[in-house]
Image (cartoon, helix red, strand yellow):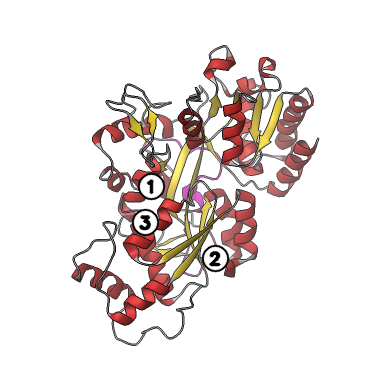
Amino acid sequence: MSDTRSGSPATTGVSRRALLKGTAAAAGVAVGSGAITGFPTIWAQNIKNITLRQIGTGVSNLNAVADKVKADLGFTLQMTALDSDAVTQRAATQPKSYDIADIEYWIAKKIFPAGVIQPMDVGKLKNFDKIVPIFVNGKLTPSSAIAQGTAPHSVGFVEGKDSTKFAKSPTQWMTLIPTIYNADTLGIRPDLVGRPISSWKDLLDPAFKGKASLLNIPSIGIMDAAMVCEAMGAVTYGDKGNMTKEEIDKTLAIMTEAKKAGQFRAFWKSFDESVNLMSSGEVIIQSMWSPAVAAVRAKGIPCVYQPLKEGYRAWGGGLGLAKHLTGLELDAAYEYINWYLSGWVGAYLNRQGYYSAVLDTAKQHMSADEWAFWMEGKPAKTDILNPEGKVMEKAGAVRDGGSFEERMGRVACWNAVMDEDRYMVRKWNEFIAA
């Protein structure tokens, strides 16, 4: 990584951020529309030499995004994709090894108190007022109930510029800039399950013995397990997102009994694993992510992201800035964040079945038919293409679960870090090893 922290022109009397914005404007090129040119020679050279190192999961660490950053902003975004547990460990224990942490909100609850991520000034965010309110106050609409678990807004702000204490209401300082989120459910092979699927409890139906699978990331898998147990009427939770030891024990006892009876074919950790299990027919009902369902469909294999009567388990992620970022690199990171929310990436994510944090700007980068299909739950008038231009859905198809409001409005819980997190993780690992 080229080090531009020292020797940069900090004494010109003009802020670096003003130069980043002003010279681009003078060149008549808007952020997000193409390569930015027109910088003074020394600044152009500095921008060209900057490399920002980003860690995150494969869900959102996308090569297409890095390529577009290079084209539009001029600097290099070096991405490293890890699983959620590895992201958590590296973010907390190796803070100098990255500049940007692309993490889920439940992970923020683990790493932000360690002081390795710097709060971000909302005054520097061009589209802050357009961010979906779930990330600001926890509610999709003013009348919405706040779902259980680690809801993003509960760890979305800190009390001050140098604080590591989460604020109870919005402040000037955000922990993460929200980027991507979704309402997750069970994926099924409709050609193989043999009957309608309507409840989370169907995951443990003996009819699917040896053909079911569960996600093996403790803070996520435990929430799927809780949705199953609650739907069965086997466990009554005070708060699924913050279980007592007794509730954890009951939940994992039920899962362990099912495992020993041969219910589960596998426990997956990566996107590709879930796709391969479903595509091969080894698994016909499982924890799944929306783009994985789409990937199976792209192979010409029937796969449905099944709406369930108990609702969805939601998750959300965002970009956090490493504590050590300063100077031109910090300014470049803010430019990247503003670019990320300016629409191109949002449309790219929406076309994969995720949701973008600023819907208005994403809509400007999608066709009317794409928006109607992905966001409004309307039948596609033409074939729906994935971000690579391949047919994902045929004309006439309707998105599983319907519109954005229907899906995100039925969130029952968020992925969570509980007060008894260490106990839960230990018990989860015992369940996996049983």
| Stretch of the chain drawn in magenta | 141-166
Q: Main secondary structure of the magenta part?
A: loop
Q: Is residue 303 above or below residue 107?
A: above
Query: Mark 2: which secondary structure?
Result: loop
Q: Earlier in the sequence, mark 2 or mark 1?
A: 2
Q: Earlier in the sequence, mark 3 or mark 1?
A: 3
Residue 131, visible in the rendered structure: no
Q: Residue at x 70, y 19 (%)?
A: 209
Please tell me the numbered disc located at residue 357.
Answer: 1
Q: Is residue 145 magenta?
A: yes
| Crowding near the residue tagged with mark 1, few <14, some 14–19, many ≥20 C-alpha atoms within 10 Å | many
| Crowding near the residue tagged with mark 2, few <14, some 14–19, many ≥20 C-alpha atoms within 10 Å | many
Q: Marks 3 and 1: which is nearer the front?
A: 3
Residue beneath disc 2: 98
How many angstroms separate mark 3 from mark 2 (CA)?
20 Å
Q: Residue at x 42, y 34 (%)?
A: 408
Residue beneath disc 3: 68
How many angstroms separate mark 3 from mark 1 (CA)?
19 Å
Residue 115 x/y as whole percent: 57, 66
Q: Marks 2 and 1: which is nearer the front?
A: 2
* Residue type, label 3: Lys
The quadrant holding residue 365 is: top left
